[in-house]
Amino acid sequence: MTIPEKTDHYVLNTYGRFPLTIAKGAGTRVWDETGREYLDFCAGIATCSLGHCHPALTAAITAQASQLMHCSNLYYTPQQASLAEVIVEKVVQQDGGKVFFSNSGAEANDGLIKLARRHGVESGRHEIITFNQSFHGRTIGAMSATAQGKIHDGFGPLFPGFVYCPLNDLEALKAAITDKTVAFLLEPIQGEGGVNIVTKEFLDALAQIAREKDCLLLLDEVQCGMGRTGTLNGWEVISPDLKPDAISWAKGMGGGFPIGAFWVKDSLAPLLGPGSHGSTYGGNALACAASQAVIETIISEDLVSNVQAREAQVREAIAEWNHPAITEVRGAGLLLGIGLDAGKLSIPEDAVASIHLCKELLGLGLLVPPAGPETVRFLPPLNVTSEDVASALELLKKVLDAHLR
Ligand SMILES: Cc1ncc(COP(=O)(O)O)c(C=O)c1O
């Protein structure tokens, strides 16, 4: 059996996989099992922030693996304490607060949902407003928070207490608020839903309403956080002075090592006291050492400046092409969605435009993920070079030109 055949035989078929088996990675490159090289602008879907096998990450994991991997949250470890300090003092920078460690983004978001539930206990409120096209993960809680019918399909009844609302529509938001509303949960830039950015006006109004109504402003920074937007925090690119009540992360904070986390401001920390929440692997020594190496490299190498420069490079090039099949470039930093006009492209009738183009690009040696039917995402590592960005752009243009009607 080939590797795809063996995988399909033994692994539950929940992913629509591309026809590529990745055997090795280094920096912005991966290689298949035949040794063919690919430029990786998927980066584990915004996860491999430092590229593949970055020496700082490899060294941190190697050193920690021979020291202590795991010991249970019944005990203290220096790695968990240090990583929490880095997140609170260097990433969030909002006068304190505390961190809980999980293993994934969905699990971090489940923690935010539990925080909101506890916040509403005394006032009898439990409803959380989330936004159309959001994506918060696949656990029953995070999936129910996700306002996309296709994600819920066949899994009902959903976990109760979520109210879905159009994004960037203040009137609809006001209409959705009830005396049961306890929190708002949103991605400052929606990733999976098509790379949709929240407007400053909407985000600021949401924060103001949250304050007035004693509701929590919960930010899902799982995809847009940790430098990806060209700022350390995704919300900063929209509204730098925003004061969220709690924040979740995963993906880019581990650079490829599984870890997630959420932060809560100090006044909310007592809501989640001893016995209220937990995770066996959450924040184990190995994951924390890996994540600290990733976050400290992002900060010490000023990768947000590189992200800004590479974003400008992509936007300038695409503006210059003035390509009839490109409608717009959405997002920020290196969380970019290139919007396509499928009507201008010759795509097989039974194919989804974005997926078809991603497959064609794969054939040319570029990995990019789709985001919805008419968007291709550029999510390269944060330390990607201008040469690699130029190569990826050249391949994109080549494929679009070849498919132009
Ligand atoms: C914004 C956002 N939140 C949550 C998740 C879920 O993260 P995980 O797959 O680590 O559970 C994702 C994953 O794509 C995401 O993009």
Image (cartoon, rainbow, N blue to C red):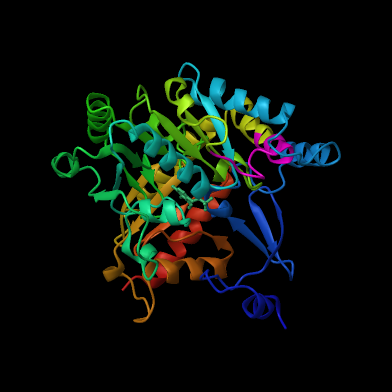
For residue 342: magenta? no
Q: Please provide the residue range marked out in magenta.
A: 277-291
Residue 7 x %, y %: 66, 75
- Check the image and name the residue furthest to the top: 95
Residue 20 x %, y %: 62, 70
Q: Can residue 386 be seen in this view?
A: no
Measuring 37% from the left and 55% from the top, which residue is drawn there? 159
In-image side of 167 versus 15 (left or right): left
Observer-nearest residue: 67 or 394? Answer: 67
Q: Is residue 217 above or below residue 376?
A: above
Count of marks, rendered view: 0
| Quadrant location, the C terminus | bottom left
Observer-nearest residue: 255 or 310? Answer: 255
- Check the image and name the residue furthest to the bottom: 1
Residue 341 x %, y %: 29, 63
Q: In which quarter of the image is residue 253?
A: top right
Residue 224 x %, y %: 45, 41
In-image side of 376 versus 180 (left or right): right
Q: Quadrant of residue 293?
A: top right
In-image side of 143 versus 257 (left or right): left
Q: Is residue 89 visible?
A: yes
Measuring 49% from the left and 20% from the top, which residue is drawn there? 93
Q: Is residue 304 above or below residue 172?
A: above
Measuring 29% from the left and 61% from the top, which residue is drawn there? 324
For residue 282: magenta? yes
